[in-house]
Image (cartoon, rainbow, N blue to C red):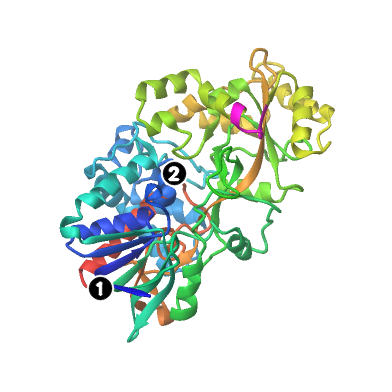
Amino acid sequence: MTQQSGSDALVVGGGLAGIVTALELLRAGRRVTLVDRDTPERFGGLALWAFGGMALVGTPLQAAKKIADSPERALRDWIRFGELDPSDHHSLAWARYYAEHSCTEVHDWLKNEGIKFMPAVNWVERGLHGEGNSVPRYHVVWGTSRELVRILVAALHCANRDNRLTLLHGHRVDQLQQQAGKVCGVLAVNEATGETIRISTDVVVLATGGINGSHEECRANWPRQRPMPATMLNGAHPNADGKLHHEVADRFGGHIVNAGEMWNYAAGFPHPFPHFNGHGLSTIPCKSALWLNHRGERIGPQPLVTGFDTHWLCQRVAEQEKPWTWHLLNWRIAAREFAISGAEHNQRIRDKQFPLFLKELLLGNHRLVKQMAAESPYFLAADTLAGLTKKMNALTCSNDIDPTVLQATADAFDANFANGNKLENDDQIRRILHARQWGPDRLRTCKPAPLQKPGAGPFIAIHMQLITRKSLGGLRTDLHSRVLGADDQPVAGLYCVGEAAGFGGGNSNGKRSLEGTFLPGCILTARAAARCIVSGG
């Protein structure tokens, strides 16, 4: 075993929260060791692959769009939609802190770092009955989250004056070290050589992500009162396994808060070129697609429509008889509405190709639809519903779908348009019309029309599964990102940031996120930890 010492702080985890913590500490003149289990080219963790959406409150862009927002309004939406526990003071404190400081400490801070946002504010998670975001708050980083990571990693190296930063990639932290009642270092393993290193430091900051990268851990914490599908895809970081959560709880009296609360997605399919076992892609479901069960029947009586309550969508999908659902649509809908979350499949935004982005926005993203039709066996197309039925049954190796059932499903929806818009009486149509009242949604959502509209084909069916993503629960922390142990007192020398801390306090989002609260939550908790460490707290 080798020894390493000399750092003022040791950060465990190379995702966004870990990078921001290290950056702020370096700028304050501290010596930092950052231990990252992944490879150098994947530095940035899940943020490297994320879309880059952020829920921000009271920004200049909102003001320019005449969106009347305020911290008070945002906090009301947050607590109501997330159903936060009134007795969980630390999570509530972080929710309030987010609402009050996301503009100055995230938006303004990022703008100062050279990061720009797209010139639109999107309206997501409105709530099934309007109890979600009461106004648009979803800001998108121009260049996606990959640009965010690139700029902050460059800033990290720029701040590394006098070689005060030690980066250890490919190292796994297995154990925290304690001396005289204070956390003072870690035991790390070089995964390439198997060598164990004891790293001594003044403080340790856990930025290890959540638990949803481990399906064993995810299933163990799944709330018993909620349905759980037999199979799921993995959209989290595979190294986010929760092992250090248990280390802190078992050895230091830390509290893991609401580990069963997760921000999963209802519409994923296997990555055509997976980066790890079980890797899935999360779609942004088409609002105009019909969401069907394994028999080709529309799920109801309330139809499933994205953009209102992701938590509810996941529960409805999880309770289905088989662990998959179908999206039934046509090429017209797919070209306008189909999208995949993340940097990888949002090339025009990621690479800052604004003219091409506008072209695809206005004329349809036929490129992505063709790409998925060519690359994914779970993305099926056919000229007739009968032909589509054959492909759907072939994919599932079953005869679950009767072609007459699929035809009847499409006919029943199309009957809404039998007399123009005079006979429309479908909640999905009502929700689509409501979404289209907001400009950015109008551009990305088709005007309601029959599924079998002439010239709108071919028909498309997408085989969807629930996909794990983020942990809403984590280690309990105070507003300084200090891990709290027995009697709610800080564990000396130990901090926790980002998803590992439930994005602040242990569970600052409660049961539901207003969406886009994760990247800012990483930044806010990381900056709070750095401030406290620098001040000697």
Work out whether residue 523 or residue 60 is closer to the camera in this orientation and state it: 523
Of tags 2 and 1, the one toward the viewer is 2
Q: Does the magenta stretch include residue 98?
A: no
- Quadrant assignment for the N terminus: bottom left
Packing grade of label 1 (10 A; few <14, some 14-19, many >=20) is few
Q: Residue 537 carries which label?
A: 1
351 relative to 365 in the view: left or right:
left
| Whether residue 446 can be seen here | no
* First-in-chain label (2 vs 1): 2
Question: Judging from the image, what secondary structure is the residue with disc 2 in?
Answer: loop
User: Which residue lies at the image location 19% right of the left edge and 59% below the top edge?
Assistant: 163
Packing grade of label 2 (10 A; few <14, some 14-19, many >=20) is some
| Whether residue 532 can be seen here | yes
Q: Does the magenta stretch include residue 378?
A: yes
Q: Which mark is residue 326?
A: none
Placement of 453 over or under 119, stated as above or below: above
Q: Residue 50 carries which label?
A: 2
Residue extending furthest toward the top? 455
207 relative to 323 in the view: left or right:
left
User: Which residue lies at the image location 36% right of the left edge and 37% below the top edge?
Assistant: 67
What amino acid is at disc 2? Ala
Where's residue 250, x and y in %? 50, 78
Residue stretch rendered in magenta on the structure = 374-380
Question: Judging from the image, what secondary structure is the residue with disc 1 in?
Answer: loop
Where's residue 320, x and y in %? 73, 47
Placement of 395 over or under 79, stated as above or below: above
Where's residue 323, x and y in %? 71, 47
What amino acid is at disc 1? Gly
Q: Distance between the residues labelled 2 and 1?
A: 33 Å
418 relative to 401 in the view: left or right:
left
Placement of 129 over or under 93, stated as above or below: above
Residue extending furthest toward the bottom? 180
